[in-house]
Image (tube, coloured by chain):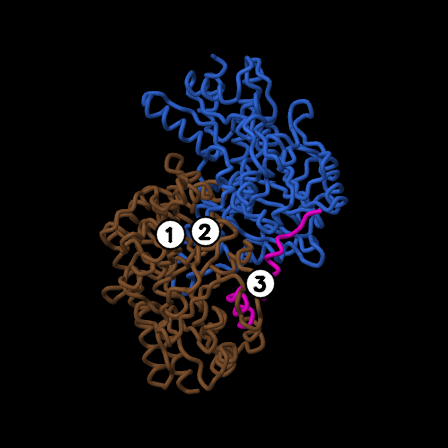
Chain colours: A brown, B blue
Amino acid sequence: MFKINENYLKLPGSYLFSTIGKKVREFSTQNPDKKIIRLGIGDVTLPLAPKVISALHTAVDDMSGKDTFKGYSPDLGYEFLRQAIVDYNYKSRGVTIALDEIFISDGAKSDSGNIQEIFDVDNKIAVCDPVYPVYVDSNVMAGRCGNYSFDSGKWSNVIYMPCTKENNFAPEIPTEVPDIIYLCFPNNPTGSTITKAALQLWVDYANKVGAVIIYDAAYEAYIVEENIPHTIYECEGAKTCAIEIRSFSKNAGFTGTRLGFTVIPKELKWGEVTLNSLWARRHGTKFNGAPYIIQCAGAAVYTEEGRKQTKDQIAYYMNNAKIIREGLHSAGYTVSGGVNAPYIWMETPKGMTSWEFFDYLLNEVNVVGTPGSGFGPSGEGYFRLTAFGSYESTIEAVERIKGL
Amino acid sequence: MFKINENYLKLPGSYLFSTIGKKVREFSTQNPDKKIIRLGIGDVTLPLAPKVISALHTAVDDMSGKDTFKGYSPDLGYEFLRQAIVDYNYKSRGVTIALDEIFISDGAKSDSGNIQEIFDVDNKIAVCDPVYPVYVDSNVMAGRCGNYSFDSGKWSNVIYMPCTKENNFAPEIPTEVPDIIYLCFPNNPTGSTITKAALQLWVDYANKVGAVIIYDAAYEAYIVEENIPHTIYECEGAKTCAIEIRSFSKNAGFTGTRLGFTVIPKELKWGEVTLNSLWARRHGTKFNGAPYIIQCAGAAVYTEEGRKQTKDQIAYYMNNAKIIREGLHSAGYTVSGGVNAPYIWMETPKGMTSWEFFDYLLNEVNVVGTPGSGFGPSGEGYFRLTAFGSYESTIEAVERIKGL
C-alpha cells in the first residue's frame, strides 16, 4: 500500500499567492464593476524589450529550419548564454566564475525550491523573518522543518532571523548555528539591502561554522546605491560557502517567459565532494533544460540594446517605487524599501493585522497588496506593495490609499 | 556544519546520456573527418511544424504588447491548453478528465523525476528492467532504493520486472508487492507495447494491493495498432490508482521546446487526501509554469493543421523505424520494437556486451546507439536505435551496419 509524503500535510493552508489570487477572484466576481489595482504578487507588467522580442522571433525561425532546429539543450544550458552571464554579471564586477559553474534553469523559483535536495534531511536551515515562502515550504516538504505552530506562526526546527524596523530589516547572526542560511538581497519582501561589509560578515561566519549560504540575488538589477554588493562573490571567501540564485523575471520581465540560473563554485565542497557535481547530477536527471528560444531571449538581455532597454524598464518601475514610497510617507504611513528594490514595505495603520489591512484595502479602495504576515511571523503588522504596476495605476493606487 | 544528501553518492557514474555524449565528443575530436550518425539519444531532428511556428510567432508578438503581455502563468497552466488536452487526448477516447486534473509542466522528464516527492521515503518502487533511468535515479536521490551492487547492476531495495525476449518484453506482476509501479508504454527503451486487456490486469492489481501506477505515455502518438491503449484511463478503475505523464517532445518535436503534462485524477487518494492536492501544492511551491509562448505552441499542436502536420512528422519517423527494423532483420539481426514506438531494440551480435557493441559501432561505422545495459541489467546484450534521425542518415546507418 503506497503512502504519501506526510510532510506535505504539515503545511498550513495554501501557498500565499494562491490564497491572495483566490480572494481577489472572489471579490472580483462579487464586484464586477470595481477596478482592482494589483500591487500584490511581484509580477511585472511591461512588455518584453524590443531586443528580446526580436531575438525570440529569430530563435523561433531557427526552430523552423532543418539545419537550425534545436533539440535537447546542453545539460548546463547553451554556452552563448552562460558566457554572457560570466562576462556581464561577474567578470564586469571583478568576479571570476567558470562556464561550468553556471546552471541555466527555468527560473529562480524552481532553483530555490529544488536546491535543498542536495543537502541532508538533518540539516537545519536559518531564514530571515519575513521571508519568500518558497525557502521554508520546500524544506517543510523535505521534512527538514519540524512542526508548525499556529500560535507562533513558526516551525519548530527552523532558525528565524527577525528583520524588523528595530534592526533596520537586516538579519543578525543567529545564536544557534545553522547548516544552511537563506539570504536574499535586495530583499523580498522588505525591499531592504545590506552593505558589502555586512555581507562579508555573513560569508566569514558561514566559512567559520561550515554553513552554506543560499544567496538569492533575483533583485540585483534594482540596486542603485554604491557599496551594495550585486553578487555575493564580491565578498572574499564566498566561493567556499555560497550558492547564488539569479532570475530574469525582474530585471528583464521574464515572469511569464521563465529563465534563471544558479551558480555553484567548484570550491564549495563537503569533504572531497563538490556541490557543483551534485547539482549537475540533479540537473541532468530531473530537468531537461530551458527552451532554446528562451535561452536566446536571455542572451539578448545582455546585448548592448538589451541592456539599455531593460535598464529603462527598471527605471520605470523604480519611478513607481518612488511614487509609492513618497506618496505613502507624505500621507503619514511608515514605509521602507523601494530604493534598491521594487518592493515597498509599510507598517499597517491603526494596529490592524496584515490580513485585516489586506481585506480593508481590497474592499475599500480595491487595491491588492501582500500581507506581511504571509512571509513569516515578524511580517505581522506590515504590508508589501510592489512597483511592478503601470505608472498610471500606481499613481491611482497611491491616491486611493491616501484618500482613506 | 552542512551535510550533503549522501544518497547522491550512491549513484554509479553519470547519467547514461551524459556518458554517451562524452564518448561521442571524444571520438569526434580524435576523428574530425568521420561523419557520425546519431541514433542514440531519443532526440528529434525535424523542425517544428509550421502551425506551431506560427503560433510561437503570434505568442511572441503578444509578449511585445502592453495589453497582450503575459506575466506569471496560472498555477496549473493556461486553460486554453488544458482544455485542448481534455478534448483531444481524453474526451476523444471516451475518457473524462477534469481541467484541474491536468498540470502543465516543462516536460515529462521533470515530472517523472519529481513525482516521487509526494510519496513517503519508505515506499518501495517496482520498475521494468530495462527502464528509462530517470525513474530509478530520482528515487535513489530520495533515498528509496537501498544500495547499488556493481555485480548485479541492481539496487537492493527496488523490485525489478525483467522485460526480455522470453516474456516478449512485457513485465509480469512481481512476486513482492510494490507500493509504486512505474510503467511506460509504448516502452522506452524496448519499443514494446501491451494490450488494453494486459494493462487492465495491472490496474486491477494496483487497486487490489493499494499500489499507485506512474504511467509514462510519452510515446502514445506512435501507436498504430488496434487494441493498444493510448491512455491508462481507458482501463476501468485506473482513476483510483494511476498518474499519467505525457510529453510534447516526441509527438510534436518539443525536445528543445520543453512542454509536458501530468494527469492526477481526484479519485486517487490516500485516506482522505487526494494526490492531486499534493501535486498541486508542489507545483505551486517549486515551479512557476511553462512559458506562455510555449503553452501557445502546445495548443497549436491540437489544432486541425497542427494535428495533421505532427501526424506527418510521426509517419516520417515511423518510416525510419521500418527501415531500421527491416534492414537489420534482413541482415540477420534479432530486432523488436519499432511498430508502435520510435525505438528499435536489437540483440547485440556475437555475444558482445552492450557497451562493447556501442564502441564497436562507433569506431567501425561511426553510428551511435544506446547500450541496453544502460537501462538496467536485463538490457545487457541489447542495443537501442532510434527512428529520430533523418531519412537519409537512417538509410546510411543501416547500410553501414549491414556492411559490418
Give yes or no for residue A231 being in the magenta stretch.
no
Pick whichever of labels 1 and 2 is earlier in the sequence.
2
**Marks 2 and 1: in contact by CB < 8 Å?**
yes
Q: Chain of mark 1?
A: A
Disc number at residue A147? 3
Q: Residues within 10 Å of mark 2 (few under 14, many from 20)?
A: some
Q: Amino acid at mark 3?
A: Asn
Pick whichever of labels 3 and 1 is earlier in the sequence.
3
Q: Is residue A232 left or right of residue B368?
A: left
Query: x, y (%) of residue A102?
Result: 35, 46
Residue interval drawn in magenta: A1-24
Report the front residue among A179 and B335.
Answer: A179
Is any atom of residue B309 visible in this view?
no
Q: Residues within 10 Å of mark 3 (few under 14, many from 20)?
A: some
Report the front residue among A239 and A286.
Answer: A239
Q: For the residue labelled by badge 3, is the local secondary structure a helix, a strand or a loop?
A: loop
Pointers 3 and 1 within a single chain: yes
Q: Chain of mark 3?
A: A
Is any atom of residue A29 visible in this view?
yes
